[in-house]
Every structure is written in C-alpha cells, then in structure tokens.
C-alpha cells in the first residue's frame, strides 16, 4: 500500500510541476492560420484515384511551426500479391492512414531486405514523403488487416507494403513532417493540380 501511495504522489507531483512549467511555453506557431479542406475537394481527389488510378495525391502541405503536416488521398485497386521491390520506407516522414473504404493486408517492420535509395528526382521524394527507400522484403514482418474505419500509423523508417487488397482500398493520409522536407502546397496549388488532371 505504501508503494502505491508513493507512486500516486510522484505521478501527481509530476503532473502539477508539468502543468506549472507548461504555463510558460509559447505557441509553436503564433499567428499561423487554420486550414480547411472541404468534403467536396476531397471527393474530387477520390474520383481521380478511382477513375484514373492515381495512387497517392497530395492535397495540402502546411507549415505548423516546428513541423509541417501533409494531407493526402490514396486509392489502390485489387492486388493478389505484392510487386517486386514494393516495400516502401520514408526516412523522415511518419504516415497515418485513415481507411475510408475497402480492405487490404499491410506488412510492416524495420528490418528491410536489400533496400535501394529512391533517387532525388523521384516524385515521392520531391513532393510526397521525402527521402526513402524501396526494398525487396521485410524480415519478421508484422501483418495488419485494414478495413474501413481503421487508423494505421507508420513511423518514419518503418518499411510498409500492401501484400493483398481484396477489391480496393482508399484512405486519407496525414503525414507528419518535422524536418520540413516536403514543399508547401496550399488551396490554390491544389485547385491547379485538380484542374490539370481533369484537363480542358
């Protein structure tokens, strides 16, 4: 019982001291505007994914002070087995998937087999998730069954690969970019991209 009381006192003290010191912290992004992305805009990206097979599309890249955050839409069609060298890993950017529809199996892990660096002019390196690699396989991979409503967090440096997709999978991606390696993209740039994909 005494150990429990001591533990509780330590936790409470840490909480109180933490709150006191937190009162002196300045905002990390003073004056930064909020960003709003409408359902209508996201639907246009989703349609491009379904109709044109565009797998990964950046919607926004926003500076939030000490980091950037990106919002992307992804759509993948049916997959019976993974392609060659389809294990991706991103050195500096963490990805959070919010599965919107469909289902699939994803494999993850840090122990990559024969990783090859993506070249600096690779579209993903320049515009989506910064420097990284593609690998042949993942040793001792964890398997994750994803379905609509799930959230899936892939830390920077963790290999990931869809090994099976039943019919399709679509997901909203939130990318956390503390090193600010991905260029900014605002609403105007998003509109220009959408117009370019649809054409005249």
Image (cartoon, grey):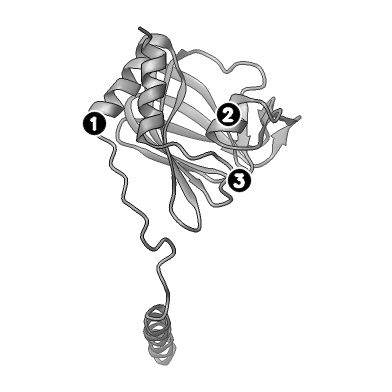
Residue 46, x across and y down, in percent: 33, 21
**Which residue appears at 62% of the width and 23% of the height?**
86
Residue 57 can be seen, yes or no: yes
Calculate the distance from the C-alpha at mark 3 to the C-alpha at mark 1. 29 Å
Q: Are marks 2 and 1 in contact (CB under 8 Å)?
A: no
User: In terms of image quadrants, where is residue 118?
Assistant: top right
Residue 175, x across and y down, in percent: 47, 42
Please state, as top left, top right, bottom left or bottom right, where the N terminus lies in the image: bottom left
Q: Identify the secondary structure beneath mark 2.
A: helix
Q: Identify the secondary structure beneath mark 1.
A: helix
Q: Earlier in the sequence, mark 3 or mark 1?
A: 1
User: In terms of image quadrants, where is residue 83?
Assistant: top right
In the displayed structure, 157 sits above or below 124; it is below
Category of crowding for the residue at label 1, using alpha-carbon neighbours closer than 10 angstroms: few (below 14), some (14–19), many (at least 20): few
In the displayed structure, 62 sits above or below 14; it is above
The tag on residue 124 is: 2
Q: Earlier in the sequence, mark 3 or mark 2?
A: 3
User: In terms of image quadrants, where is residue 158?
Assistant: top right
Residue 95, x across and y down, in percent: 49, 41
Category of crowding for the residue at label 2, using alpha-carbon neighbours closer than 10 angstroms: few (below 14), some (14–19), many (at least 20): some
Badge 1 is on which residue? 39
**Which residue appears at 59% of the width and 25% of the height?**
123
The tag on residue 92 is: 3
**Which residue appears at 47% of the width and 34% of the height?**
144
The number of numbered badges drawn on the structure is 3
């Amino acid at each position: 019982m005494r150990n429990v009381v001591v533990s509780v006192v330590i936790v409470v003290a840490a909480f109180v001291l933490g709150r006191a010191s937190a009162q002196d912290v300045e905002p990390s992004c003073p004056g930064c505007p909020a960003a709003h992305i409408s359902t209508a805009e996201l639907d246009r990206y989703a349609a491009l994914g379904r109709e044109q097979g565009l797998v990964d599309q950046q919607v926004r890249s926003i500076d939030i002070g000490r980091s950037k955050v990106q919002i992307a839409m992804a759509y993948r069609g049916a997959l019976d087995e993974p392609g060659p060298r389809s294990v991706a890993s991103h050195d500096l950017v963490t990805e959070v998937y919010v599965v919107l529809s469909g289902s699939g199996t994803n494999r993850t892990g840090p122990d990559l087999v024969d990783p090859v660096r993506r070249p600096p002019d690779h579209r993903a390196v320049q515009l989506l998730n910064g420097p990284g690699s593609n690998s042949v396989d993942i040793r001792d991979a964890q398997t994750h069954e994803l379905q609509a409503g799930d959230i899936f967090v892939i830390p920077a440096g963790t290999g990931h690969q869809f090994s099976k997709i039943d019919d399709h999978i679509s997901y909203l991606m939130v990318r956390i970019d503390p090193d600010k390696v991905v260029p900014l993209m605002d609403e105007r740039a998003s509109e220009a991209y959408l117009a370019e994909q649809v054409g005249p």
